[in-house]
Amino acid sequence: MPPYESDSSDEGEDYTETNVLLGYASEKPSGDTVSHLGGHPTWLDGKTAPSGALAKCKVCNGLLTLLLELNGDLPEHFPGHERRLYIWSCRKKTCRRKEGSVRGIRGVRVAKGAASKPKATPKPEEPRQEEKPQPQLGASLFGVKNGASSGAPANPFANPFSSNPPSANPANPFAKPLLSAETQEENKEEASAALPQTFAEKVRLSSPPPTQPARPHEPWPAESAFPPAFPCYFLDAEYETLDAPSTPQIPSNVRIETEAESSEKGGGKEDKDVFESSLDKTFQKFADRVGQNAEQILRYEFKGKPLLYSDSDTIGKALASHSENGTSSNAKVSVSKGGKGIPRCQSCGADRVFEAQLTTHAITELEADEMSIDGMEWGTILLGVCSRDCKPNDVPEGEVGYVEEWAGVQWEELASRK
């Protein structure tokens, strides 16, 4: 996090701007017409909805309520991809604190030809076709529409500090000439015909099955079938700024007591241990960090580190080393052999990375008009997404598909609500 010093002509205080983009709820429209807190969902193409199975709570099988819809376009990471993120929650009290009562969905549309595929070297006798100019990545970042996201607003939550993908490698003069798909298929058929039939059958039988499992396809329920929606807020976005840590000044007339002197008076180490054990340092860091921008409802940093609400629950123990509290610099936090991290993508098996999290002030905004004090009980909701931004295998390029992503919930401590 690069430090930034304010001008001496202003307040004269130092502060730090981080790479985390914060979202704030606003009743007035912002520049991003897609992202919003609460309300009803909108789809990438305005008509293609996910499978209705993704709209159901895994605990009670009832319909969920939308918490967040976020414009997830990241042209510097996934050029030609349109992305949208959704977080849903079950409103039934009996489903709280149970896995599957909060679900995350990623919508994706990959423009035709956007996937980086090796192009076959043209034969000498064939005339080289004139290639159409491709939209530049920088142009899309500055608001120029490209073929994949025509008409879609720029994503204010895209992180300009993130590293750009590496440039393509130069051509390898020692590589074998690439063959067309038809030629490759003909060669496979000829090779299979030349082999004994039994061996060819064994080869086909031993071929691995598709990596993506079959997805459920159910009609998306009518809007009237869902529970009442939360009020809808637009999102304003700005980068997180933190006050520089202050160095307390000790008055000259104060005497500092050593640990040895303190232990002689009957206090000391035992009292210190009792105090530190009763203090949840992870929660304190969460409260202090969020408290510096108290009205934030969203923290966003693709391939960043989550800010944990607790380190004593299952999620806290799994992600502690990859969080703001940990020392790991690895942005990919998929499950390791020791069971630490986020589960891998269920669609393609790739690592998942952290992208966004809701904070507790979102509850205040969503339940502002509700008189009951028995509302939502989560401290933060983390969203982990496929690092490859994969699309379903059964969705052709240029069409919209939806994939369920990992939503990790850290619940409030029960004692804190008494």
Image: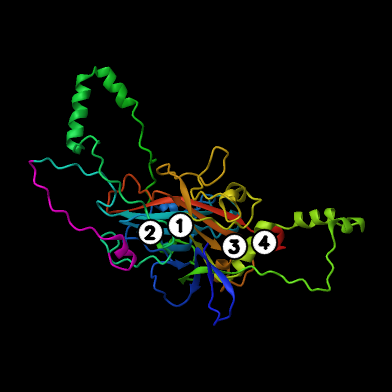
Residue 96 appears in the figure: no
Separation of residues labelled 4 and 1 (CA atoms): 24 Å
> Are discs 2 and 1 less than 8 Å apart at CB?
yes
Q: Would residue 105 be found to the left or right of residue 126 on screen?
A: right
Mark nearest the camera among 3 and 4 is 4
User: Amino acid under label 1?
Assistant: Phe
- Numbered mark located on residue 302 in the image: 1
> Which residue occupies 52% across, 64% down?
2
**Badge 1: how crowded within 10 Å, few (<14), some, or many (20+)?**
many
User: Amino acid under label 3?
Assistant: Met
> Which residue occupies 67% across, 61% down?
284
User: Amino acid under label 2?
Assistant: Leu
Q: Which residues are magenta?
A: 125-145
> Are discs 2 and 4 less than 8 Å apart at CB?
no
Comes first in the chain, label 3 or label 4:
4
Q: Which residue is mark 2?
A: 74
Which type of secondary structure does the marked residue at label 4 adopt? Answer: helix
Separation of residues labelled 1 and 3 (CA atoms): 26 Å
Front-most of residues 9 and 78: 9
Which type of secondary structure does the marked residue at label 3 adopt? Answer: loop
Separation of residues labelled 3 and 2 (CA atoms): 31 Å
Mark nearest the camera among 1 and 3 is 1
Q: Is residue 130 magenta?
A: yes
**Badge 2: how crowded within 10 Å, few (<14), some, or many (20+)?**
many
Which type of secondary structure does the marked residue at label 1 adopt? Answer: loop
> Which residue occupies 68% across, 69% down?
247
